[in-house]
Image (spheres, helix red, strand yellow):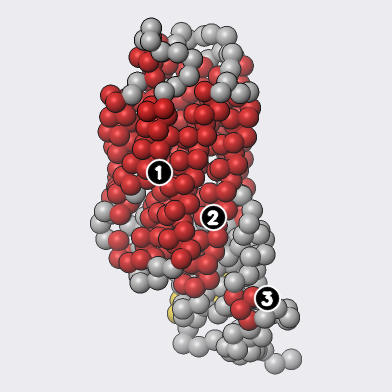
Amino acid sequence: MRCDHCANDVPDGVFCTRCGAHQGKTAAPAEAKARVNRYAAHPSEHVIQPSIFTTIFPHLGHTKIHEFRWGFAVGLAGILVLYIAGLITAALLVAIFLVPMLYLIYLYEAQVYRDEPAIVLGFTIGGGAVVGIVLTVLERIVYNPYQAIGNPLHNAGIGVGALLFLGLLVPVAQEVLKPLPALFLPNRADFPETVDGLVFGIAAGLGFSVAESLVAFSSALTSLPPHLTPGNWIYDLTTLAVFQPLLQGSATGMIVAAVWRYRRGRLASREIGGVAVAVIAHIAFALGTQLLKDAQVAPLVVLVWQAVVVGAVLIYVRYLLHHALLEEAAHMGFAETVCPNCHMHIVASGFCPNCGGALTAAPASLKRARKPRAEAPTRAKT
């Protein structure tokens, strides 16, 4: 059949396997190409939807995504139980490692690393952790909030210099240094797609988040008694378990994805915007959190602010990845494969003709199993 939007001859299906547009729809070709109502990695969702798992786990299909959602929910429930029981140290450790551990499982499940798991994991998560330890220790040497509190000259508010250091200089330094492990990954040519750069950047950011949290809460982890009254720890636990790792991972992922696009000669305004959004969002997160805590507002308000910033970052990650997938999937040849989203056996180019999902976001095992076809099949005669 001939696609209504790109005019290519493609296999019969609900969606065009070349451009991914919905067949039979009256949208203009440009509108169909830039569609935002169907997120390329998971076409059942809108692009402007701050969904955590379909954003940071782009290689997984519908069924596997639900397994990770359940794993995350069980982890949060475990943190809540530990908090209620007064086991704050254990709750802190679970909160710090929850999202990074899920990401390790995802990297294994999707086989993003292909045949070199030790190198990829070492340069992304391990390298991010090393950067996190070094940078956070240096930050504590320059400004230690616990020493400031013990200083008799310290008052209830934080100084302007410390505020600018924690809310401006530190976030910028982190966004400059966090991507380095992923950017120096050996054999980068084996991972050409933008989605690979995004995933490696997120992994480096999560490694950094683990190290930063362990150093920042080292005093609490080593000095808290085994059991104590829960108090207000639930707010810090929520930040550690949800908002901080998502911010650190997503921001680094956007920067690395932009560099991946630049190396392929496809850097556009949206990639430059991604770098800017990553830095601005990190500053807004850190500076806003510090100002709200200094103003002694309700801790719930701080969490709402953090949620707004992280939600905005997730939406831009989806916007960036969506357009990258649309562009890169359109250049793939026809092959026999299995759609990671709907699990149908198909003959397709860049998009599944059954659900419209971008096949460049498939796990590495499915990409390797593609059986090239010389041309698209013709519509079967009835």
Q: Is residue 256 left or right of residue 301?
A: left
**Which residue does the numbered mark 3 point to in the structure image?**
22
**Comes first in the chain, label 1 or label 2:** 1
**Which residue does the numbered mark 2 point to in the structure image?**
316
Q: Amino acid at mark 1?
A: Gly
Q: Secondary structure at mark 2?
A: helix
**The C terminus, quarter of image:** bottom right
Above/below status of 45 relative to 372: above
Viewer-proximal residue, 293 or 100?
293
Viewer-proximal residue, 286 or 232?
286
Q: Amino acid at mark 2?
A: Tyr
Nearer the observer, disc 1 or disc 2?
2
Nearer the observer, disc 3 or disc 1?
1
Marks 3 & 2, CB-CB < 8 Å contact: no
Q: Is residue 197 left or right of residue 22?
A: left
Above/below status of 167 relative to 110: above
Label disc, if present, on residue 205 of the rendered structure? 1
Numbered marks: total: 3
Q: Amino acid at mark 3?
A: His
Which residue is found at the position 46% from the left and 8% from the top?
Answer: 225
Which residue is found at the position 63% from the left and 70% from the top?
Answer: 35
**Comes first in the chain, label 3 or label 1:** 3
Pinpoint residue 299: horizontal percent, then vertical percent. 60, 24
